[in-house]
Image (cartoon, grey):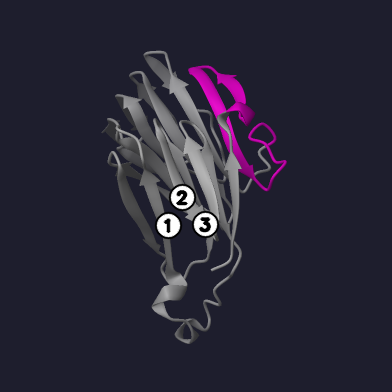
């Protein structure tokens, strides 16, 4: 496996404000793209919804994946459905839907455009324990990146003989550059689609981590 690893410290994020509260732009790809200019292909962000009711910005040609990390919110997609989310529950929807919220909460966002897509998941690393994270990519997709974002505490990992210490609010972004030829999947073995990382929590509190998986 060929990985390029980037550890982004929370001090380097770009804070912004929207009508419902404060938001933080964690990473956009390509590097140098911004949410404001809408020239990203994928983006990770963290936001607070601090007012009782709000309406999301209309974002044509964007797919959104949203996970609540604190609080409770009701998402209502006009003429489609409503969904109540509590911590570590999520919803996926299109950015050009008319979406309103009720409730205050914190949310983690993954946005993708064009042929990029992704998913969010939540893991808990127990005190003084390892967590063996494994992701099996389907053979019709190419992995772009796997990102780990701890909501609290600290965890460590070793990738390609390099140690990383990820603190609360930091982002560990593991980029993958080996593309799978989806027209010749029979030439690959199961291990070519499997990505494994050992995460270690040496502290005495459970670490809650949001994992973002981006592929195309």
Magenta stretch: give its range: 11-37
Q: Residue at x 58, y 43 (%)?
A: 7
Q: Which mark is residue 197?
A: 1
Q: Residue furthest bottom?
A: 187
Kindly state the secondary structure of the residue where label 3 is placed. strand
Tell me how far mark 1 sits from mark 2, CA to CA: 7 Å
Q: Residue at x 49, y 86 (%)?
A: 187
- Residue identified by numbered label 2: 157
Q: Nearer the viewer, residue 81 or 40?
A: 40
Is-magenta flag for residue 23? yes
Q: Residues within 10 Å of mark 1 (few under 14, many from 20)?
A: few
Kindly state the secondary structure of the residue where label 2 is placed. strand
Point out residue 184 in the picture as x, y percentages from the top left corner: 52, 84
Q: Nearer the viewer, residue 173 or 139?
A: 173
Q: Residues within 10 Å of mark 2 (few under 14, many from 20)?
A: some
Q: Which mark is residue 159?
A: 3
Q: Give the left or right position of residue 148, taking residue 27 as reference.
A: left
Q: Is residue 111 visible?
A: no
**Is disc 3 in contact with disc 1, using a CB cutoff of under 8 Å?**
yes
Tell me how far mark 3 sits from mark 1, CA to CA: 8 Å
Q: Nearer the viewer, residue 44 or 80?
A: 44
Whichever of callouts 1 and 2 sits on the residue coming sooner in the sequence is: 2
**Is disc 1 in contact with disc 2, using a CB cutoff of under 8 Å?**
yes
């Amino acid at each position: 496996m060929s990985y390029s690893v980037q550890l982004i410290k929370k001090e380097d994020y770009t804070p912004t404000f929207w009508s419902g509260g404060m938001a933080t732009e964690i990473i956009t790809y390509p590097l140098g793209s911004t949410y404001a200019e809408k020239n990203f292909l994928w983006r990770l962000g963290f936001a607070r919804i601090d007012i009782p009711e709000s309406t999301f910005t209309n974002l044509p040609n964007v797919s959104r994946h949203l996970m609540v990390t604190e609080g409770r919110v009701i998402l209502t997609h006009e003429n489609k459905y409503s969904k109540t989310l509590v911590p570590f529950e999520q919803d996926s929807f299109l950015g050009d839907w008319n979406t309103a919220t009720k409730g205050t909460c914190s949310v983690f966002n993954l946005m993708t455009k064009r042929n990029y897509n992704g998913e969010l998941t939540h893991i808990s690393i127990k005190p003084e324990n390892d967590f063996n994270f494994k992701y099996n990519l389907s053979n019709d997709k190419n992995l772009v990146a796997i990102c780990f974002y701890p909501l609290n505490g600290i965890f460590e990992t070793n990738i390609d003989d390099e140690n990383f210490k990820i603190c609360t609010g930091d982002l560990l972004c593991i980029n993958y550059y080996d593309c799978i030829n989806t027209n010749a999947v029979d030439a690959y073995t199961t291990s070519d689609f499997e990505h494994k990382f050992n995460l270690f929590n040496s502290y005495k509190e459970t670490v809650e981590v949001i994992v973002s998986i981006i592929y195309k």
